[in-house]
Image (cartoon, grey):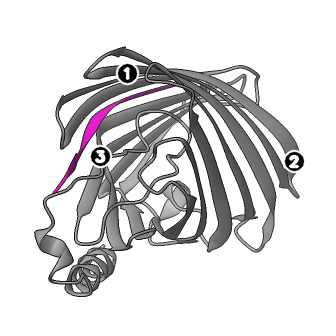
């Protein structure tokens, strides 16, 4: 755990030290959180700015015929650091994940807790880096197995995300986030192809409140079992200031291969 914390601190320190000094004094602002929707925004953080997105608490339920699994993440944090007009670096990590599994046949309960794996990514915007109009980007990423037990994938994964978001007008927006990855196998000894797509609709309720609806479809070709997952999500974001957001997310699984329910409460800010 100490090594993972050291990795996180060193990465953020290097990112901060690499920011142009002049850019750090800019008065303009670009605030475009990924959360609370399932998809990603297409814009990038301005050079010299750090945008932090965090779930204060996130609970997921996977209840099937054999077992019930409850997973809780505390303070899951995504830091987005702007390096150029259209480029940002990202690091995503949770300092505490708790998982409780109950075997329905025997009644046995097992628990595991610890830190999560670390995600490192670079987002390169292609069009409209401020998020207005048609905003597109490409985002390669790698997952590092810093967690332990069932919390961790046990080996590295890598892939790329491509968000496409279009603001139809001041009220409506639509988006699509595609992802393809070499995902870690369930037995932790290799990787397999995994692909997903997220369709999103955003609606501006008022000047500071926005609602989102998302549909996710994912194909996971793990050698142990090829499955298709489907999710439907609804979320609400409130921005009391130009630099602050609070949000809530609810996700429902639509088939038996998908976790049944996920709830998250958190927010975002930029400095």
**Residue 160: numbered disc:** none
Residue at figure coordinates x 63%, y 46% from the top left: 164
Q: Position of residue 247 (x, y in %)?
A: 31, 28
Which residue has dot 3 on it? 54
Q: Nearer the viewer, residue 205 or 115?
A: 205
Instruction: Look at the numbered disc 3 and give the secondary structure of its residue.
Output: strand
Label 1 vs label 3, nearer the camera: 1
**Residue 225: numbered disc:** 2
Residue extent of the magenta highlight? 262-271
Which residue has dot 1 on it? 210
Mark 3: give few (<14), some (14-19) or many (20+) Cα within 10 Å.
many
Residue at figure coordinates x 56%, y 40% from the top left: 39
Instruction: Tell me which label, 1 or 3, sits earlier in the chain.
Output: 3
The reply to whether residue 75 is visible in this rendering is no
Q: CA distance from mark 3 to mark 2?
A: 32 Å
CB-based contact (under 8 Å), mark 1 and mark 2: no
Label 1 vs label 2, nearer the camera: 1
Q: Nearer the viewer, residue 170 or 82?
A: 170
200 to the left or right of 11: right
Mark 2: give few (<14), some (14-19) or many (20+) Cα within 10 Å.
few
Asked which quadrant contains residue 210, the reply is top left
Residue at figure coordinates x 41%, y 33% from the top left: 36
Instruction: Look at the numbered disc 2 and give the secondary structure of its residue.
Output: strand
């Amino acid at each position: 755990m100490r090594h993972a914390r050291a990795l996180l601190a060193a990465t953020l320190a290097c990112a901060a030290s690499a920011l142009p000094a002049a850019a750090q004094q800019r008065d303009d602002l670009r605030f475009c959180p990924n959360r609370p929707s399932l998809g990603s925004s297409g814009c990038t953080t301005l050079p010299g700015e750090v945008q932090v997105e965090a779930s204060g608490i996130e609970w997921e339920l996977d209840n099937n015929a054999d077992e019930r699994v409850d997973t809780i993440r505390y303070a899951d944090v995504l830091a987005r650091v702007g390096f150029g007009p259209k480029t940002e670096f990202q690091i995503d990590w949770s300092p505490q994940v708790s998982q409780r599994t109950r075997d329905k046949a025997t009644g046995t309960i097992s628990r595991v807790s610890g830190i999560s794996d670390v995600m490192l990514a670079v987002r390169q915007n292609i069009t409209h880096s401020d998020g207005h109009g048609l905003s597109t980007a490409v985002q390669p990423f790698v997952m590092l197995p810093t967690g332990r037990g069932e919390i961790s994938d046990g080996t590295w994964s890598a892939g790329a995300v491509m968000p496409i978001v279009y603001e139809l007008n001041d009220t409506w927006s639509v988006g699509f986030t595609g992802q393809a990855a070499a995902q870690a196998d369930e037995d932790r000894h290799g990787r397999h192809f995994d692909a997903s797509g997220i369709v999103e609709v955003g609606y501006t309720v008022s000047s500071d409140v926005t609602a989102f609806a998302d549909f996710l479809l994912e194909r996971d070709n793990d050698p142990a079992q090829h499955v298709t997952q489907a999710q439907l999500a609804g979320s609400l974001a409130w921005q009391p200031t130009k630099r602050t957001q609070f949000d809530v997310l609810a996700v429902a699984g639509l088939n038996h291969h998908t976790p049944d329910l996920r709830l998250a409460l958190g927010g975002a800010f930029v400095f």
